[in-house]
Amino acid sequence: MNTMSTVCGFLPPQLARTRLRSRVTHPMNLIPFIPDNAPFSSEQRLWLNGYLAGIFSDASAHGGATSIQPALPAAPVIPLTIVFGSQTGTAEALAKKTAAEAKKRGFEPKVVCMDKIQGEELAALKHLLLITSTYGDGEPPDNAQSFWELLKADSAPALSDLQFSVLALGDTNYSGFCEFGKLCDARLEALGGRRVHARVDCDVDYEAPAKTWTDGVFLTLCGDGATEPESTPAELPVGYSKKNPFPARLLTNRLLNAPGSEKEVRHFEISLEGSGLSYEAGDALGVMPANCPDLAAALLSELGLDGEEAVMLPDGTESSMRHALLHHFDISRPSTEFLAAAAARTPDGELTALLDPAQRDALKKYLWGREIIDLLPGMTMKFTAPEFVALLKKLQPRLYSISSSPKAHPGQVHLTVAAVRYTAHGRSRKGVCSTFLADRANESTSVPVFIQTSHGFRPPEDLTRPVIMVGPGTGIAPFRAFLEERRATGATGKNWLFFGDQKEATDFLYKEELQAMVADGHLSRLDLAFSRDQAEKIYVQSRMLENAAELWSWLEAGAHFYVCGDASRMAKDVDTALHTVAETAGGLSQDSAADYIKRLKNEKRYQRDVY
């Protein structure tokens, strides 16, 4: 190994570019230049001390003038803006990771949330990387709404000087897969931007395509003067994370519904002792489930396999077929690749016709309630074990809003989970993770978990601020955590909760806890909406409108407004009701009400945890 080239990799650029012209004297006779606590080995310190001594001894011999080659001009620093739109924090984390990579390559990166971008700032950008998720059926994340309004407006600035690329995050199980990223990509081009790298659309298993995009983007941009980074050792997992979940222990599994309910909502308490994991109220817990053994056995039977066949796992290692189906692959929802392969082996052609992009809605309707196992009968040829797993998607963790405050329950994390069970097409169906927790996790088995940090769903830092929380059904989860947190921190601001479900007698989740909080004054108001207790269905948004005047007075007093639950219907209905409150109780016009709600969002006083 060339010692000089090895050690110069640690030197500042100016020293790395110098050229030694004199011979180095014996190191033992030197006054050391490099301190013992410098980040070098003893051998490297010894060499560097000799190297620097040679430079300065050469300078002394020539009247103080060193024979140092002039430093090469520094490579130009290229400003790079990385904007993100994120609902759960994944896109934000990727943006920060991309920024770290950009800095290594000589860029000057700036990470900005989409809701912070103004028109004049957008117009001035030269290099832009856009990383965004899509939620619901093709909608922007909450913190991307204002950016999209700016981008799609007729008054949007011309972007003829902009170079850009888009990384879109999504889930192929939704019809609007990566739709918001696609819209942004097309609009940036329409405004005159030049795409330096093709958009990459990532499914839930996003790590590999995201890296491909990052490498491709910088390969192109480095032609503008940036540098390729020196190779670095592969990243090692540090602590417990999504890539390395903690094998937690389940402490409590309690049914929250009373007998006679049509629902099955459970309260889980999980120990984090010994994990080093910490969380805050508003965060989510990632749970890596195992698949149902009965479903895995049924698949093996349908395929005519015994489960001992050798197959490759997503990480490139070998496993038995049975183990792979239980722990590594999604064996419920058919992937796009599986659908295409199934269509090729199905003689009637129905599935082939449905795969036409024009039949997207019909395909969605056809697949409702159908799983992979429903598509196997009637095929002209069975899959081999390797063929089958090659068509499956990687099993993904599920994220659940945490329903506890760490201050109230140190060393524990609580979840509020609805167990999914239903019958469709003659078969019983089970939610992968919800029934893993409800049926198969116990004190003798581990529950692999990690913390998913929320970057935009927190109780107000100002403890005097009032809070209004709207959380029907399992949407109550983070608000139980908020109420516990605000009690523990001594918050003096008032608390108002809107909760609803089907029937009060059977579906009043955490009834005793909430009533106790009302009794002692911690919960200032509790408004309930049980939809099936009367002929006319009443929902949480109905209660909001009934109490519009007081709700408006709380907002005007600085209250923070929170929503948790179903994105497709409930959250939209609540948002509509909030606009109506601003119009009726606040006396605002429709446009002024929209501006008011937008201001609440910009001030982080209107936050949503929706799914």
Image (tube, helix red, strand yellow):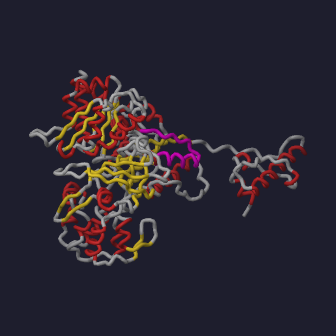
- Residue 490 percent coordinates (x, y): 41, 31
Q: In percent of the image, x 43 and y 49: which residue is there? A: 451
Q: In percent of the image, x 31 and y 48: which residue is there? A: 416
Q: Is residue 181 in view from this perspective?
A: no
Which of the 4 image quarters holds residue 330? bottom left
Which of the 4 image quarters holds residue 189? top left
Determine if the magenta segment contains residue 114.
no
Front-lying residue, 201 or 378: 378
Residue at the left extreme of this rendering:
535
Q: Is residue 287 in view from this perspective?
A: yes
Relative horizontal placement of residue 266, taking residue 220 as reference (left or right): left
- Residue 425 percent coordinates (x, y): 17, 63
Front-lying residue, 240 or 192: 240
Determine if the magenta segment contains residue 109.
yes
Q: In percent of the image, x 35 and y 46: which residue is there? A: 401
Q: Is residue 247 above or below residue 56?
A: below
Relative horizontal placement of residue 229, taking residue 609 as reference (left or right): right
Which of the 4 image quarters holds residue 6? bottom right
- Residue 174 percent coordinates (x, y): 28, 53
Query: Which stretch did the figure color magenta?
Result: 94-113
Task: Name the image quarter holding the N terminus.
Answer: bottom right
Count of numbered badges drawn on the protein: 0
- Residue 354 percent coordinates (x, y): 21, 61
Q: Is residue 352 above or below residue 97?
A: below
Q: Is residue 302 above or below residue 241?
A: below
Q: In percent of the image, x 11 and y 38: which residue is there? A: 536
